[in-house]
Amino acid sequence: MHKVLIISYYWPPAGGPGVQRWLNFVKYLPEFEIHPVIYIPKNPKYPITDKNLIKELPKKVTIYKNRIFEPYVYAGFLSQKKTKQISAGVISAGNPSLLERTLLWIRGNMFIPDARKYWIKPSVRFLTDIIKKEQIDTIITTGPPHSLHLIGLALKKKLGVKWLADFRDPWTSIGYHSQLRLTSSSKRKHRELESKVLNSCDKILVTSNTTKIEFESITSKPIYVITNGYDIPESNLSFNDLDRKFTLAHIGSLLTGRNPENLWKVLYEIINENEAFRNSFQLNLIGIVGQDVLKCIYDNGLKNYTRVNKYVTHSQAVNHQRKSQVLLLAEIDSPDTRGIIPGKLFEYLAAKRPILAIGPKNWEGGEIVKSTKSGFVCDYNSVSDLKVLLLKWFQLYQQGNLMVSSENIKQYNRRALTAKLAGHLAWE
């Protein structure tokens, strides 16, 4: 059986979408005669945790751990709450505080490519012996954090191993880079490191065609798209198993930028005009919600109709997805986010509930919703068509007939995606 070393920062008990991709690849790789050897930090400080994910770990997987130094943990003079928020992606809209501006400047300019940079050298020393001991000839790095790709870069140079670099998100083009207050020299350093990684690895994995096209302008190395997916049985719930109320649910982080104010305005308009809708509607927000987003929702008259549950386990999130009448998918309205496909989309598909997707024009996430006929896609300027849709879905809900007949979603099953990965690990 062929061994591969997978270098990842996120691993159970880490919660959130960052852990799901490789946890599921690892689960199915042995079916394709590939034995995964995992390397993770021994003492990580994850923004969110989900201990239930430990139960999903394969029993026969080899895991190596090594201590990591994370400077934010020792920055006692800074707000632990703020550093944890920024680590989780919660950046205030409008005018950030002096403390937040300081944290962003430090994060962007002192820790390049990120605050896990101090794990690079110890990991290279540690893994040199492991690679020889386990007789490994292939390594995989997955980022962000993109500092893990620099571990791969060093091991490639030192040992000549085959190296596949997996980008769950872009590097220099990701939306939050513009908020890190980067100096011109810091921007240049990020671009140089990105180019060095892309041109030194043997193969590249990305999660969207947009990122593939972007990287093709930087490197001639082979680039393959393997999206995220779902690893849960497709739902077969009847209408009687769904929420009694006409629930619109967003599962996951709803942060600055992902704030479809047009939707909140339309909902309040319908509430004022339609008594039945007013008595039946409920907005469920499950996950981290930015204070500016929540304020906008409340300012648009929806406070009494909104239920917030900041964090639930993955299994509880899946239950919410399946029971909700309508699922909300929102992405930042920017050309930079057209290639961002939220991981939750694929579990939404498996839940087989109507998806209301709001995002930028030519958004890949929206194209998946359209191609699978799993819901409706609109942009941040939609109003009249959004209102017509919601009233149509509400009428179907009243009739006990609000369902969706999606197509071709099995291609996003994690086992099918792992089969594609296994093919890319067959070196010529």
Image: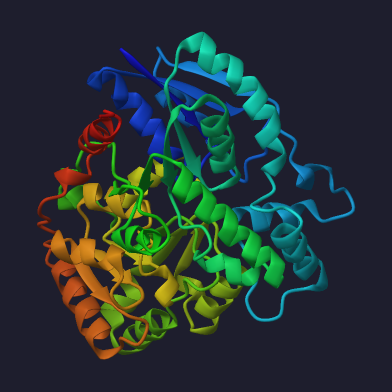
At 23% from the left edge and 47% from the top edge, which residue is drawn?
Answer: 350
* Above or below for 6 versus 354: above
At 48% from the left edge and 25% from the top edge, which residue is drawn?
Answer: 54
Image quadrant in which you'd find residue 93: bottom right
Q: Looking at the rendering, in which quadrant would you find the C terminus?
A: top left
Image quadrant in which you'd find residue 71: top right
Outermost residue, right side: 77
In the image, residue 260 lies at what x, y percent?
42, 77
Q: Is residue 62 visible?
A: yes
Q: Is residue 332 visible?
A: no
**Which one is in front, 153 or 400?**
153
At 24% from the left edge and 20% from the top edge, which residue is drawn?
Answer: 31
151 vs 352, left or right, is right
* Image label count: 0
In the image, residue 121 lies at what x, y percent?
69, 32
In the image, residue 383 lies at what x, y percent?
30, 88
Q: Looking at the rendering, in which quadrant would you find the N terminus?
A: top left
Q: How is the image coloured?
A: rainbow
In the image, residue 344 lies at what x, y percent?
36, 52
152 vs 91, left or right, is left
**Which one is in front, 154 or 349?**
154
**Which one is in front, 344 or 237?**
344
Image quadrant in which you'd find residue 180: bottom right
